[in-house]
Amino acid sequence: MRRARLTLGYDGADFVGSQIQGSGRTVQRELELAIQRLAPGSGRTSFAGRTDRGVHAVGQVVSLNVSWSDSAERLRDALNVVLPPDMSVGAVEWTSPTFHARYDATWREYRYRIWVAPTPPPLGRRYVWWRRSELDGAVASDACSTLLGRHAFGTFAGSGRSRSHDAAALTRTVRTCEWRVQTSGAVVRHELRIEADGFLPQMVRTIVATIVLVAQGKRDVQWFREALRANDRSVPGEPAPPEGLFLWCVRYDDERDDSGDGFRSDWEYGIER
């Protein structure tokens, strides 16, 4: 039995979430079925981050004990033969027997993409939030800067957490929060890039929806700052839809920012087309 670290990508549109649950198709279930088919007797999988229904990943990290005597590259290739077409393993590495994808992670990065245009993207509708109304990228960037540092994020947490958890349980450190804009003819692509030591349920999607209110001019940046300080989920509205959200990568200790890239650059090219 060997300890393996997998870099996993998936199109979340047809999954009810990443983790095995009572019913519905999940990423974990499909992955474990594929592993047992190739390496019977292997252990259960642990994911670095949980993704909800419809949320994608290009750099999810999975750890497990696997009954496999061949190379890591052969395991990667074999998995990509038997996995369904909306999942792909970018890399397999042998690692420390104590490595845990979730508990050893130091930083996680998410990205959220918005397509602003008169018409939806013909091929990428499953991977963006399509909107017709214009957004002010400079104002959105200003709002993003508010989130840098260590804060209680109860305002942006789902599942009633701002009421059922104290501030310490809702506190996270954000070290990167950027709003990027790319214009191509009538299409304006907006992307939030956010990296933190952890995320609360629906946190990124609620942040996006709240920044959009500010970028539309319906609220101002000062209101956004006050909303963050309020630590009250009743302040913002509903979260942004899941299809624009990607778990982009997971980092461990002092790894370089491009560690475990797998196929991430290829996905980026495909999504931007």
Image (cartoon, rainbow, N blue to C red):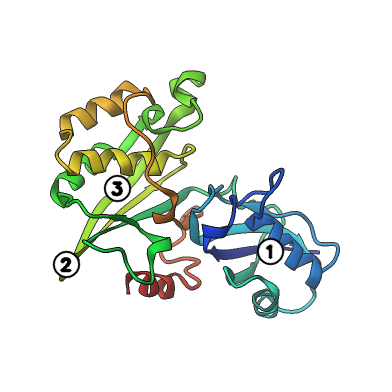
Element assignment for label 2? loop
According to the image, label 2 marks what residue?
Answer: 186
According to the image, label 1 marks what residue?
Answer: 4
Is residue 270 visible in the rendered structure shown here?
Answer: yes
Residue that appears at 14% across and 39% down: 217
Task: Name the mark nearer the viewer: 3 or 2.
Answer: 2
Q: Amino acid at mark 3?
A: Cys
According to the image, label 3 marks what residue?
Answer: 177
For the N terminus, give its image quadrant: bottom right
Q: Position of residue 199 (x, y in %)?
A: 46, 40
Task: Name the mark nearer the viewer: 3 or 1.
Answer: 3
Q: Position of residue 125 (x, y in %)?
A: 38, 63
Looking at the picture, tell me which residue is in the foreground, 20 or 72.
20
Is residue 245 visible in the rendered structure shown here?
Answer: no
For the C terminus, give its image quadrant: bottom left
**Marks 3 and 1 in Cβ contact (< 8 Å):** no
Sequence-wise, the earlier of marks 3 and 1 is 1
Sequence-wise, the earlier of marks 3 and 2 is 3
